[in-house]
Image (cartoon, grey):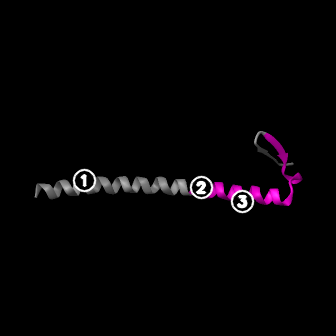
C-alpha cells in the first residue's frame, strides 16, 4: 500500500477520500509546474547574463570607435 506523509502524519493513500486524493494530485501538479518554471527561470537568467556580457563588449568596441 502506498503512503503519503502530510504534516508529519502518515496516511494510506487508498484510505483518503476522493476529495483528498484530488487535492493531492492537484498539489503534485502544482509542485511539478513550480519546478519546471524554476528551471526555465534559471535558463533565462543564464541567457540574460550572456546577453549582458555581449552588450558590454559591444559598447566597449563602440567606445573605441
Q: Secondary structure at mark 2?
A: helix
Is 56 left or right of 5, judged from the image as shown?
A: left
Q: Earlier in the sequence, mark 1 or mark 3?
A: 3
Instruction: Give me the residue at 81% from left, 56% from top.
Output: 20
* Of 7 and 10, the residue lying toward us: 7
Give the residue at mark 1: 56
Q: Main secondary structure of the magenta part?
A: helix
Looking at this view, name the residue that lies furthest to the top: 8
Q: Choose top left, top right, bottom left or bottom right for residue 36.
A: bottom right
* Of 39 and 11, the residue lying toward us: 11
Q: Residue 46: x, y in percent? A: 41, 53
Q: Tell me the CA gap for discs 1 and 3.
A: 45 Å
Give the residue at mark 2: 34
Q: Is residue 16 magenta?
A: yes
Q: Which stretch did the figure color magenta?
A: 9-36
Q: Residue 38: x, y in percent? A: 53, 53
Q: Tell me the CA gap for discs 3 and 2.
A: 12 Å
Give the residue at mark 3: 26
Q: Choose top left, top right, bottom left or bottom right for residue 59.
A: bottom left
Looking at this view, name the residue that lies furthest to the left: 65
Q: Residue 14: x, y in percent? A: 87, 53
**Image quadrant occupied by the C terminus:** bottom left
Amino acid at each position: 500500500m502506498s503512503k503519503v506523509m502530510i504534516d508529519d502524519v502518515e496516511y494510506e493513500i487508498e484510505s483518503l477520500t476522493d476529495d483528498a486524493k484530488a487535492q493531492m494530485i492537484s498539489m503534485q501538479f502544482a509542485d511539478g509546474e513550480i519546478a519546471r518554471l524554476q528551471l526555465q527561470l534559471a535558463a533565462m537568467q543564464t541567457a540574460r547574463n550572456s546577453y549582458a556580457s555581449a552588450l558590454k563588449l559591444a559598447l566597449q568596441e563602440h567606445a573605441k570607435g
